[in-house]
Amino acid sequence: MSRPGTKRQSRVPASPAARLIKLGLTAGGMAAGGVAEGFRRLGRGAPDDAHSVLLTPANARRLARRLSEMRGAAMKLGQLLSMEGEHLLPAEFSAALTLLRDSADSMPPSQLRRILGREYGHGWEARFDSFDFEPDAAASIGQVHHAITADGRELALKIQYPGVARSISSDVDNLGMLLRASRLIPAGVDMAPLMREAKRQLRQEADYLLEGEYLERYGQQLADEPGFRVPALHRDFTTRRILAMDYAPGSPLEHLAHADTDQAERDRIGGVLEHLLFRELFEFRLMQSDPNFGNYRYSPASGTVTLLDFGSTVEFSAEFVRGYADVCRAIIAGDRARVAEAATELGYLRPDDPPAHAKEVVDLILLVCEPLAHDGVYDFQASNLLQRAAQAGMDLVFQSEHFQSPPPSTAFLHRKLVGSFLLCARIGARVNVRELIGEFL
């Protein structure tokens, strides 16, 4: 029922105490790395700074590796910081945490078997004709396995790691404490709202029955979109910790980046992905907010994209969507005053912020919305927008005493926007973004 393992395996620490020990070892390793870096600098006659000696590439890799072993909320928060915190974290740490977006360690088969027995009961093997113990993918909350049921259905089973759900609050709190203690996050940045929002969203992601409902809702919403496929849910094999859906064969979306892929096809797929983003925000008010490359499959034969993961689905209020429509209209019109008004309504600015700070925030908004403001086809691959935006954000954080973190309600929208940009850049798409959004404004 399985083939030899090829992914890196490690047991998932299931209890809050075991997970705290993992983070404690990480903190100790980072401190030791800082001491070693301090001695190296001393030998070179370089200035010693208790803060800067911690911010080394080795410590960045050490933190990313430990979070990959822990999985769960700790890894998920690391992923979120890698996208939402590009203007907060040192470059080495942002780059290292970016690796968390791609994959995690997988569980050893012995741990996986215990979960299957707990969820499906004694003799669960009889429900399957075959079950592949080598996961197709391993992410922060769970890993995906290919199986064929005894009645012949071909399924993808997303199986949640043990202890993830009950460790969410402690994971987020403990990682936040580590980031603060190591001074990786600037002292003036209030992490509490982001951490509260992360806990709320992670509790939702750990409920696979709820994700199954979102999977079905998306299938209904996209029934009129021939460019997308949403797998069907199989309720009889779905539990709160196992999600069963149609198995979706196909190539990774990066297949489109191959040199032999026609540019017109890259542009078309980039266009349908951007159009879906606008439908999610302005029409559905329902958004799959984790555009990880692994959450998509591409079928060259049919030209369709399969959407795979709906755990990080968020719903937006009508008021929130109206605010974003207002700011988009103002950006297209080049109306800086209206951009400032909309930014205040959305919580990016305070009514009493001084004009100089308001100007800086409006400048940053106009910068990050460059594809929308651009009149014509935008070449995502040729753009260095993310680097420019990261530098501008860093300047704003460290140089403005009036800086405040973006509203927590925007964190997962920002992740979608950044991730969608990265998707289009990876496949080399050129898209007229302004034209696509026009029908929604």
Image (cartoon, rainbow, N blue to C red):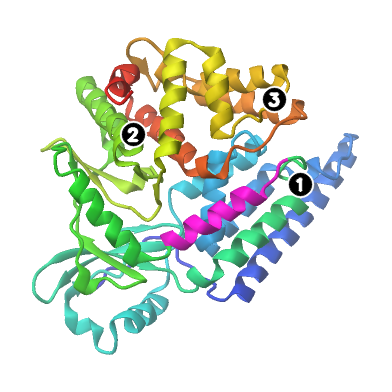
Of circles 2 and 3, the one toward us is: 2
User: Which amino acid does the dot numbered 2 rest on?
Assistant: Phe
Left or right relative to 33: residue 103: left
Which residues are the magenta region? 189-205
Label 2 packing within 10 angstroms: few (<14), some (14-19), many (20+)? many
User: Which amino acid does the dot numbered 1 rest on?
Assistant: Arg
Mark 2 in CB contact with mark 1 (< 8 angstroms): no
Q: Is residue 383 above or below residue 206?
A: above
The spot of residue 377 in percent (x, y) is: 32, 14
Left or right relative to 271: residue 421: right
Label 1 packing within 10 angstroms: few (<14), some (14-19), many (20+)? some
Left or right relative to 73: residue 380: left
The quadrant the C terminus occupies is top left
- Residue identifier under label 1: 183
Mark 3 in CB contact with mark 1 (< 8 angstroms): no
Pointer 2 or 3: first along the chain: 2
Q: Main secondary structure of the magenta part?
A: helix
> Dot 3: what SS?
helix
User: Which amino acid does the dot numbered 3 rest on?
Assistant: Asp
**In front here: 9 or 74?**
74
Q: Is residue 428 above or below residue 60?
A: above
- Residue identifier under label 3: 395
Of circles 2 and 1, the one toward us is: 2
